[in-house]
Image (tube, rainbow, N blue to C red):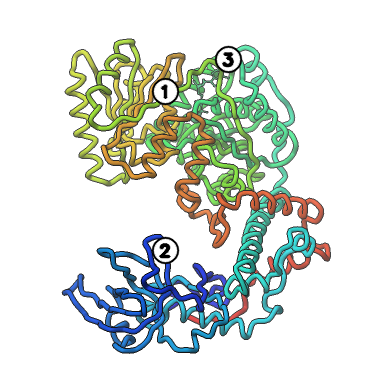
Amino acid sequence: MLRKEVSIFSFGDLLEYYPLRHIDKTKIDSISSLSASSDFAQVAGKIIDKQIIGEKRSKRLVVQMKDQTGIIELVWFQGITWADKLISIGHQYLVYGRLGFFMGKPQMAHPDIELYSAQNATGKSFLEPIYPSTEKLKSKGLNGKAIGKLTQELFKKLTENELPENLPQSLVEKYKLFGRFQAYRNIHFPINEKAYQQALRRLKFEEFFFAQLGVQLIKLNRQQQFKGLHFEKIGSLFNDFYQHHLPFQLTEAQKRVLKEFRKDLGGGKQMNRLLQGDVGSGKTMVALLSMLMAADNGFQSVLMAPTEILAQQHYLSIKELTKSIPIKVELLTGSSTPKQRKPILAACADGDVQILIGTHAVIEDNVVFKNLGLAVVDEQHKFGVAQRAKLWKKNSIPPHILVMTATPIPRTLALTAYGDLDYSVIDELPPGRKPITTFHRKESARPQVMSFIKEQLALGRQAYIVYPLIEESSKLDYENLMKGYEEVKSFFPEPQYHISMVHGKQTSEQKDINMQRFAGNDTQILVGTTVIEVGVNVPNASVMVIESAEKFGLSQLHQLRGRVGRGADQSYCILLTGPQLSRDAFERMNIMVQTNDGFLIAEKDLEIRGPGDIQGTRQSGALAFKLANIVEDKAMLEISRDEVLKILEADAKLELPEHKPVAQFLASQKSKRGWGKIA
Ligand code: ADP
Ligand code: MG
């Protein structure tokens, strides 16, 4: 039961089943003093009435309780039979719960309730833990309080021996932390509020410390296990390209990042690096230059993109850029025919292909390389450790790996979810870019928005109109897209205007044709779903209209907006929303209107959504903190990381006596806690 409802499997789990809050049993509110401003309340009184009313789903138990000052109503919608049996008219009860008001009268739904005797009113202050429970558990008598009793029993038996200190004594002293045993006891049964806060602080620190230690150890192991491929020289391909064919001057940030790569590539260590750079910051060029370094040293490279469209675009632009230097570049995607595949696969295997560009197809097992030296993964911050490991296996000595993302990741997230990667940032846009102007408009302004697009088209520019596609299969979203398309067509009739449409239900051939027509300026408007989100580069497009913008998250809005502002012209992004917005949605629109800074937006995104929701990181486990919060406890995260780095620098194997507690804890974690199961 416990196992299924709240996943408590062992004593260890019970220890880490932390209370939501504590209540002081001696503090009883009088009913007349309750006001809408009090969130939770504890009252004691006599039951004067109880009735089961309503039918089926609206069936409920309604109980009236009276103290000397007034009457409160208690309601159960679930576990009715159980509550009905427990409660007798005429008896005194103590109840605790979230307070609500109905027609001016105080009310509690599903409060905790127990018989009230002189005993539980014995003046001594006692902070009782309140644990989360479920209605089903409650109906079996296992409410939060019962879980508390189990925990209390546990603590009667538990000694410091079973919960030994796992942090170095020096850190416990330096940061004035509670000992581990003391912390666990006080987070459940604090002697006072201050002790609770201290316990919380200690356990959060411990969470961060061991998470950081985990990622840093992964990194260390990898560095010891793999010696990196050595790109000894900067050769003629790189030099020729850099000196004669570079279409622009690199930004300072691009140069700095290249130097950082160079250190890894030429330094005999395997590169595992995350490159962050806002949309349009020029990551592709940095990737290309690194691939040229690989080729100069006789190694092959792959560049992997998340979509066919993007892979194709990379292929075309890299082909164009490298047309006057002797390098063989090929494209391989899911839609390459067997006939196209065969010679490419053969050329990969005998080392002929120097740069292979493609989708996930390039890491399939049938793609064999002669000597893969560098793998670049574009626009996929979801590319996790497991997938990276697949790439490592593509060569007897694992290739260098560069993961590029335009969805900036706040530092705290980068440290936790990607802590095992090194980290480079392009924090500068190429010169001459005009910041995109962003507007937020309601549905009712649609005609004006369409006229605005007309003006832009008259100047020779192009426009995107994007519809949300929340789920690939959602029928409603497609209907909206089609309706939208028809509507756009009526505003922009042929033959004066031409429109392309792309969406996920098209074959990739259809998608390509439509994209290419837009990219070649044969069509002025591209109507589509978020398949155009990532990477697409059409510098002549100056307007991005996002329909139902309230349905998108901040980072997705920022990505979409990044499709414009790529040329020399002033570009615009228009966020169209319905008339009514939730507070969060309204805040998102405001942030978009106020800033173009992707890093700021990512920080805000994290603040609004909370760390648990950040796409693709949930599964990573690196963020599975029970107490700590990477937004609120940012400073502590940084501190614990610094301490971990210091420790590993001095004693990577954790062999010094002062690190013994840490080493022992890690070992005990591996062998899983030896405690019995209770569930
Ligand atoms: P992203 O970082 O979003 O992948 P891209 O690599 O697609 O950005 O670059 C965006 C545009 O900026 C491309 O058209 C590219 O040619 C151009 N670009 C890149 N670096 C520079 C630079 N240093 N100076 C001028 N233009 C640049
Ligand atoms: Mg890109």
State the separation of the CA atoms marked 3 and 1: 25 Å
- Identify the mark at residue 437; answer none if there is no mark: 1
Of labels 1 and 2, earlier in sequence is 2
Q: Which of these two is toward me, 632 or 539? A: 632
The mark that comes first in sequence, 3 or 1, is 3
Disc 1: CA contacts within 10 A as few (<14), some (14-19) or many (>=20): some
Residue 359 figure quarter: top left
Identify the residue at image location x=55%, y=23%: 429
Where does label 2 land, which residue? 38
* Residue 577 lies in quadrant: top left
Residue 490 horizontal side relative to residue 73, left or right: left
Amino acid type, label 2:
Ser
Q: Residue furthest right?
A: 657
Distance from Cα at disc 1 to Cα at disc 2 = 44 Å
Q: Disc 1 vs disc 2: which is toward the camera?
A: 2
Q: Quadrant of residue 541?
A: top left
Task: Kindly identify the amino acid type of the residue bearing the numbered disc 1.
Answer: Thr
